[in-house]
Amino acid sequence: MVKILQRKYIILGAALLLSFLAFLLVQKVFFKEEVKKEIPPPKIEIDFRVLESQALKELEPFEKIEPFEDQIGRENPFLPY
């Protein structure tokens, strides 16, 4: 009886060890990290001719918003009535 249990544990341990080794092998072979080359940042060029365009000159400014004459609401809205 004892030898059967020992044999089960030895077989289980060997199976776990082989599974772990197979997992490591698959990770190293199929999921290799590629060496990334450094890519220089792109050169940014701003076209300032847009600021001189006729469409931008024809834009109209926003209307000025005047503050309210009367006070709206209560001084402390969280106080009960």
Image (spheres, helix red, strand yellow):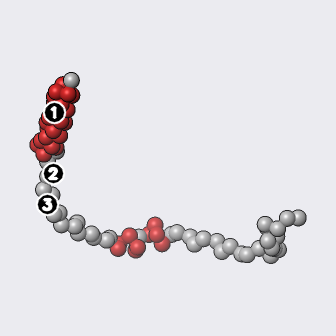
Q: Amino acid at mark 2?
A: Glu
The spot of residue 40 in percent (x, y) is 18, 66
Q: Which residue is mark 3?
A: 37
In the image, farthest residue toward the right? 81
Q: Which residue is mark 2?
A: 33
Q: Which residue is mark 1?
A: 10
Residue 45 in which image quadrant: bottom left
Is 16 situated left or right of 62 in this image? left
Q: Amino acid at mark 3?
A: Lys
**Whole-Å distance between the Cαs marked 3 and 1?**
47 Å
Q: Amino acid at mark 1?
A: Ile
Label 1 secondary element:
helix
Is 45 drawn above or below residue 19 in the view shown?
Answer: below
Is 3 drawn above or below residue 35 in the view shown?
Answer: above
The spot of residue 20 in percent (x, y) is 17, 40
Can residue 23 be seen? Answer: no
